[in-house]
Image (cartoon, rainbow, N blue to C red):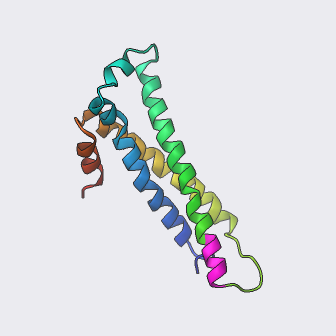
Amino acid sequence: MWVTTAWPVVMWVFLTVIPSALFSAESFAGERERRTLESLLATPISDRGILLGKIGAAVSISWLAGLAIPVIGLITANIADWQGAFRFYPILTIVSGLVLSALMIVFVVTLGSMTSMRASIVQDAAMTLTSP
């Protein structure tokens, strides 16, 4: 079932959103808490460059860490239900997982960075992002 249905994509997308929200909540609020935001903004890097750098770092870390989810699921599914040959995901599942997880991560990280800019501490940003 794990290899033939859409569950890997659903799990891949939703499990990569969680760490990306936490990474982005820490971005600007963490700088503010450590009192390094002023010195960061005083560097010759533009404000847009700082924002894109923080978003890019959180997206790449979350997306690369999220690649472990379908790999671990595939290994587990093959071990649990071995049928004499290694089974793999259909190409549509792989492509849709890669694209949908990347889009969701970019959305959540951008939203989290905007929330982090307004929050005074990391805990406020994280609570705003994760509370219903």
Q: Is residue 43 above or below residue 68?
A: above
To which quarter of the image does residue 87 belong? Answer: bottom right
Q: Where's the N terminus, which quadrant?
A: bottom right
Expressed as whole percent of the image width and height from the top left, the position of residue 48 reads 43, 24
Asked whether residue 119 is drawn in magenta, I would say no
Predominant secondary structure in magenta? helix
Q: Nearer the viewer, residue 96 or 115?
A: 115
Looking at the image, residue 99 sits to the left or right of residue 50; the answer is: right
Count the labels in the image. 0
Magenta residues span 74-81
Q: Which residue is drawn at the image coordinates 29% and 49% (left, top)?
A: 129
Q: Is residue 29 above or below residue 86?
A: above
Q: Point out the residue furthest to the front here.
A: 34
Residue 45 vertical placement versus 70 (above, below) = above
Which residue occupies 28% across, 30% down?
A: 32
Q: Is residue 77 a member of the stretch shown in magenta?
A: yes
Percent across and percent down for residue 64 are 57, 50
Question: Which quadrant of the rendered structure holds the C terminus?
Answer: bottom left
Q: Is residue 81 above or below residue 9?
A: below
The x and y percentages for residue 56 are: 50, 37
Residue drawn at 33 percent across, 25 percent down: 36
As drawn, the residue found furthest toward the right would be 85
Q: Is residue 103 left or right of residue 74?
A: left
Report the front residue among 85 and 111.
85
- Please state the horizontal and vertical placement of residue 13, each as a whole percent of the image: 49, 59
Residue shown at 28% from the left, 41% from the top: 122
